[in-house]
Image: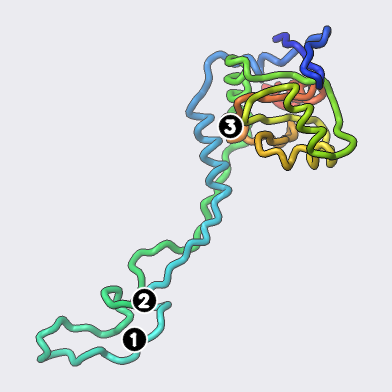
Amino acid sequence: MKTEIYGINGSKQTETCDLANSVFGIKEINNHLIYQAIRCELANKRQGTACTKERSDVRGGGKKPWRQKGTGRARVGSRRNPIFKGGGTVFGPQPRDYSYSLPKKQKRNSIKNILSLKAQNNLIKVVEDFKVESGKTKDADKILKSLTEAKRVVLIYKEDDPMLKRAFRNIPTIKTLSYKRLAAHDLFYAKEILILKSAADELKKFFGKK
């Protein structure tokens, strides 16, 4: 699957890049697999720290409010009863762990399905390798504006570059990801995906295996 390469000034280069069909050329998209991957990522981000006080946690309740019989009222043994003000909560949320994991093969296949879906919609652009030596946001923003006008962008790079990540981190419209640590949620909702040439070559090796 041949695709054009763009320079950081937005112009097309003379050379082309060969994207692996096993990664970018899947024709029958598995939508349920994509849903499972995104659902898993969102569940793993949940804190699960919501906590309410039950009967045993609230203060008071040592003395019986009124005698058992003869008052005409219902029998009550404690002020911690949920029907009273200041009483315990019934079946309220408690701290829990929402996280779970998908099989490794499903994770990889979900990423390949998303990349293929974006490729079908012409939302993938391969860019020549570049660095932001200054680490300044204004320099990164200039490059970004010359490459795309999309309001939600993912940039995939090969090697961790602290200055590159530093330059782009203050731009709310772009997310930088390593080719080895791609997030299904970010990729799926991106309006355009920019892939550095070196990262595109590595994607073939990393995800191209059967």
Residue 59 x, y percent position in the rendering:
40, 83
Q: Earlier in the sequence, mark 3 or mark 1?
A: 1
Q: Looking at the image, which residue is at 69% across and 36% down?
A: 175
Q: Are marks 3 and 2 in contact (CB under 8 Å)?
A: no
- View extreme (right): residue: 133
Q: Please determine whether, in this image, residue 7 is positioned above or below residue 73.
A: above
Quadrant of res 66: bottom left
Residue identifier under label 3: 106
Q: Earlier in the sequence, mark 2 or mark 1?
A: 2
Quadrant in which the C terminus appears: top right
Q: Looking at the image, which residue is at 57% across and 42% down?
A: 41
Q: Residues within 10 Å of mark 2 (few under 14, many from 20)?
A: some
Distance between the alpha carbons at the discs numbered 3 and 1: 53 Å
Q: Earlier in the sequence, mark 3 or mark 2?
A: 2
Distance between the alpha carbons at the discs numbered 3 and 2: 44 Å
Residue 34 x, y percent position in the rendering:
53, 30
Q: Is 33 displayed left or right of 115 in the figure? A: left
Q: Residues within 10 Å of mark 3 (few under 14, many from 20)?
A: some
Residue identifier under label 1: 61
Q: Callout 1: helix, strand or loop?
A: loop
Closest to the camera, between mark 3 and mark 1, is 1
Question: Which amino acid, mark 2?
Answer: Arg
Q: Which mark is residue 120?
A: none
Q: Are marks 2 and 1 in contact (CB under 8 Å)?
A: yes
Quadrant of res 177: top right
Q: Is 76 displayed left or right of 177 in the figure? A: left
Q: Looking at the image, which residue is at 48% across and 62% down?
A: 50
Residue identifier under label 2: 55
Residue 60 x, y percent position in the rendering:
37, 86
Question: Which amino acid, mark 3?
Answer: Gln
Q: Callout 3: helix, strand or loop?
A: helix
